[in-house]
Amino acid sequence: MSGRGVLVVGASSPIAVAIAEAFAAPDAGGARTAGGGDQVAGGGDRVAGVALEQPPTPPYQVALAADCSTAAGAQAAVDATVEAFGRLDVLVLAAAVMPVAPVTETTDEQWRAGLDATLGTAFAVCRAALPRLPRGAAIVAVSSVNATLAAPGLPAYAAAKAGLEGLIRQLALEYGPAGVRVNAVAPGMIGNADLPHVTDGYPLGRVGTPADVAGAVHYLASAAAGFVTGAVLPVDGGLSIASPAAYLRPDLRARFLPD
C-alpha cells in the first residue's frame, strides 16, 4: 500500500476527508493523497483532492482547484496529481450534490447540477485517468442507497447515483483486462445521530459515520479486494436488506426491536 498516489474527487465533504485519512494513515502504508475544486490531495499513501483553493491541509498533500465535470478540469486534476506524486494508483469518486425537490418542481438547473456533479464528473475524471492508471490500480466510487431505494424529493440525486453504478459496471468490464478494478460503495444515512427515530430503519441500530464509508473504500482499493470488481458494496447498517413490513407491522417490530 505504501507510496501509492490517490486522487479524491469531491474532497471537501466529511466522507471524502475520512477516506483521505484512511489512505494517509501511517498504519495504512502511507499513501499520498490529492484533492481540489471540490476535490483535494493529501498524505500517508499520497492523497490529492479536487476543489480546494487553499493550501493543502492534512490529510491531503496536494490541493487542486478544478471543475472536474468538464474535460479540461478533469484532465488538469489528473495531470497535477501525476506531476505531484509521479503516479496515480487509486481514484476515489466522491463528488455529489443533492437537490431536494419533487420532479415537477425540480428546475433544469437542479437537474443538470445533480447529474453533472456525480455522473458527469465521474465520467470526465475516469476518461482522463484511465490512460494513466497502471495495472493493479483501483477506482472506487461513492454511490448511495438512493440508487436503488427511492426517497421523496431526490429525482436528480437518485438518477445520478443509479447512473454512477451503471458506469462502474461498464468500466469494470472494459478495463478488467488491463488490471484496473472498479467498484463502488453505497452508504445509507451518514451522520445525523441526533435523530434517534431514524435509526429504527437500520438493523444495526445506528446510522453510519464517515469512517464507516472510508473503511469500505480503503478495502476495495486494497490488495485484499484484488479479485473484486464491478461490485457495489452496501455500507448502510442493513437498511437495504430490511422489508418495510418489519418496521411497519407492530407484531414484527416486537420480534427484534426493543420496547
Image (cartoon, rainbow, N blue to C red):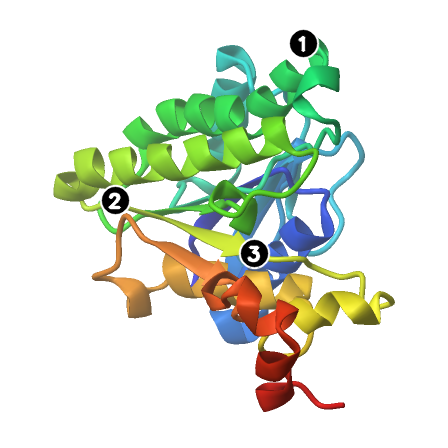
Q: Which residue is mark 1?
A: 108
The three-letter amino acid code for the residue at tag 1 is Asp
Q: Secondary structure at mark 2?
A: loop
CA neighbours of label 2 inside 10 A, class few (<14), some (14 to 19), many (20+):
many
CA neighbours of label 1 inside 10 A, class few (<14), some (14 to 19), many (20+):
few
User: What residue is at 46 percent from the left and 47 percent from the top?
Assistant: 5
Check contact, mark 1 vs mark 3: CB within 8 A: no
CA neighbours of label 3 inside 10 A, class few (<14), some (14 to 19), many (20+):
many
The one nearer the camera, 46 or 162, is 162
Residue 201, which numbered label? none
User: What residue is at 26 percent from the left and 33 percent from the top?
Assistant: 170
Q: CA distance from mark 1 to mark 2?
A: 35 Å
Q: Closer to us: mark 1 or mark 3? A: 1
User: What residue is at 77 percent from the left and 29 percent from the top?
Assistant: 53
Q: Which residue is mark 2?
A: 180
Q: Name the image quarter holding the C terminus.
A: bottom right
Q: Residue reaching furthest right?
A: 194
Q: Position of residue 223 (x, y in %)?
A: 30, 65
Q: Name the image quarter holding the N terminus.
A: bottom left
Q: CA distance from mark 2 to mark 3?
A: 23 Å
The three-letter amino acid code for the residue at tag 2 is Val
Q: Which residue is mark 3?
A: 187
Q: Position of residue 62 (x, y in %)?
A: 64, 41
Q: Do we see residue 68 in this rendering?
A: no
Left or right side of 214 for 52? right
The one nearer the camera, 89 or 222, is 222
Q: Secondary structure at mark 1?
A: helix
Q: CA distance from mark 1 to mark 3?
A: 27 Å
Q: Position of residue 181 (x, y in %)?
A: 28, 48
Q: Closer to us: mark 1 or mark 2? A: 1
